[in-house]
Amino acid sequence: MDMLVQENAIKKLNKNELRELYGGLSISGTIITAFTNGIKTIFEMGRSLGSSIRRLSERKLCEIS
């Protein structure tokens, strides 16, 4: 029964109706959080790489026991 309701609810739009559609972009908290987490990850990777390069150049490496 649900399939019949879904099939009847779908309507094909003609060209004039398609031109009247308006879309939009909204920035939600989820997008902002994902973006800031990505920036934090890149920053931490750079910090780790910089620390590794500094320790290698100063020859201050931890000994493996």
Image (cartoon, rainbow, N blue to C red):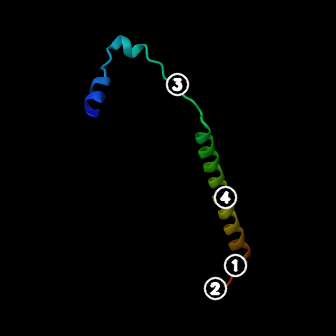
Q: Nearer the viewer, mark 2 or mark 3?
A: 3
Query: Which quadrant holds the N terminus?
Result: top left
Q: Residues within 10 Å of mark 2 (few under 14, many from 20)?
A: few
Q: CA distance from mark 1 to mark 2?
A: 9 Å
Classify mark 3: helix, strand or loop: loop
Q: Residue at x 37, y 13 (%)?
A: 17
Front residue of this view, candidates 11 and 47: 11
Question: Which numbered disc flags the more N-terminal residue, 1 or 3?
Answer: 3
Give the residue at mark 4. 44
Give the residue at mark 2. 64
Q: Residues within 10 Å of mark 4 (few under 14, many from 20)?
A: few
Which image quadrant for residue 45? bottom right
Give the residue at mark 3. 24
Which image quadrant for residue 47? bottom right
Classify mark 4: helix, strand or loop: helix
Q: Residues within 10 Å of mark 1 (few under 14, many from 20)?
A: few
Give the residue at mark 1. 61
Instruction: Give the amino acid type for the residue marked by disc 4 in the picture.
Output: Glu
Query: Is the Cβ of the residue at disc 2 closer than 8 Å to that at disc 4?
Result: no
Q: Is residue 5 above or below residue 34?
A: above
Question: Which numbered disc flags the more N-terminal residue, 1 or 4?
Answer: 4
Instruction: Give the amino acid type for the residue marked by disc 2 in the picture.
Output: Ile
Q: CA distance from mark 2 to mark 3?
A: 56 Å
Front residue of this view, candidates 46 and 58: 46
Question: Which numbered disc flags the more N-terminal residue, 2 or 3?
Answer: 3
Left or right: 51, with 16 as reference point: right
Residue at the extreme bottom of the image, as rendered: 65
Q: Is residue 11 above or below residue 53?
A: above
Q: Residue at x 54, y 28 (%)?
A: 25
